[in-house]
Image (cartoon, helix red, strand yellow):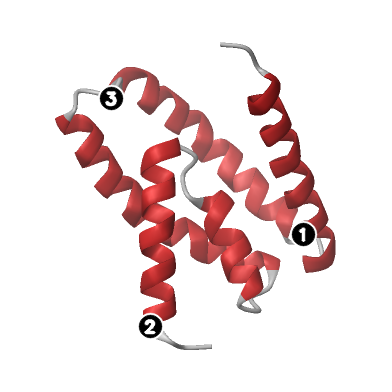
Amino acid sequence: MDNAFIYIAGGIMVGIGASFSGLGGGFLLVPFLLFLGYSAQKSVGTSFLAIMVISVSALVAHNKLDNVDYRIGLLLGLGGIIGAQVGARLLEHVSTANFKKIFAAILFALAAYIFTKKG
């Protein structure tokens, strides 16, 4: 499916969700791409490119509001570099059908945690 409007509209919604929640947008982009028929591997890889672009824009906006701790962000990013390399290689061994189940379970667990957490 190659309708630029669908991708741009999806990007707008993901940009709003990512900038609002800080979840990076993958929680929205990956299901969106899976819905459009992409494999798990292509969905995740493509979402990272989009997230990079969205994240830079969100960083600029949050920086203007003085909502960025650069030290902690860079430390988390350094650890994330290692984790991203491991995760990408692990994903190569997971079918799209199993990925959908794992991804849904992670989203459900996060939602349950956030919903039940006090404060």
Image point (64%, 53%), residue name: 88
Estimate how packed mark 1 is, as few (under 14), some (14 to 19) or many (20 or more) residues with alpha carbons within 10 Å.
some
For the C terminus, the image quarter is: top right
Please provide percent x and percent y for residue 77.
43, 32
Q: Is residue 12 above or below residue 17?
A: below
Question: Which SS class for mark 3?
Answer: loop
Nearer the observer: mark 2 or 3; the answer is 2
Give the residue type at disc 2.
Ala
> Do residues under tags 1 and 3 come within 8 Å of each other at their CB atoms?
no
CA distance separating discs 1 and 3: 32 Å
Q: Which residue is mark 1?
A: 100
Question: Which SS class for mark 2?
Answer: helix
In the drawing, does residue 60 fall left or right of residue 14?
left
Please provide percent x and percent y for residue 95.
82, 65
Q: Which residue is mark 2?
A: 4
70 or 62, nearer to the observer: 62
Count of numbered circles in the view:
3
In the drawing, does residue 21 fall left or right of residue 96?
left
Image point (41%, 59%), residue name: 13
Estimate how packed mark 2 is, as few (under 14), some (14 to 19) or many (20 or more) residues with alpha carbons within 10 Å.
few
Give the residue type at disc 3.
Val
In the drawing, does residue 64 fall left or right of residue 70?
left
CA distance separating discs 2 and 1: 25 Å
CA distance separating discs 2 and 3: 32 Å
Image point (25%, 33%), residue name: 62
Farthest residue, direction top: 119
Q: Which residue is mark 3?
A: 68
In the drawing, does residue 115 fall left or right of residue 3?
right
Please provide percent x and percent y for residue 5.
37, 81
Mark 2 or mark 3: which comes first in sequence?
2
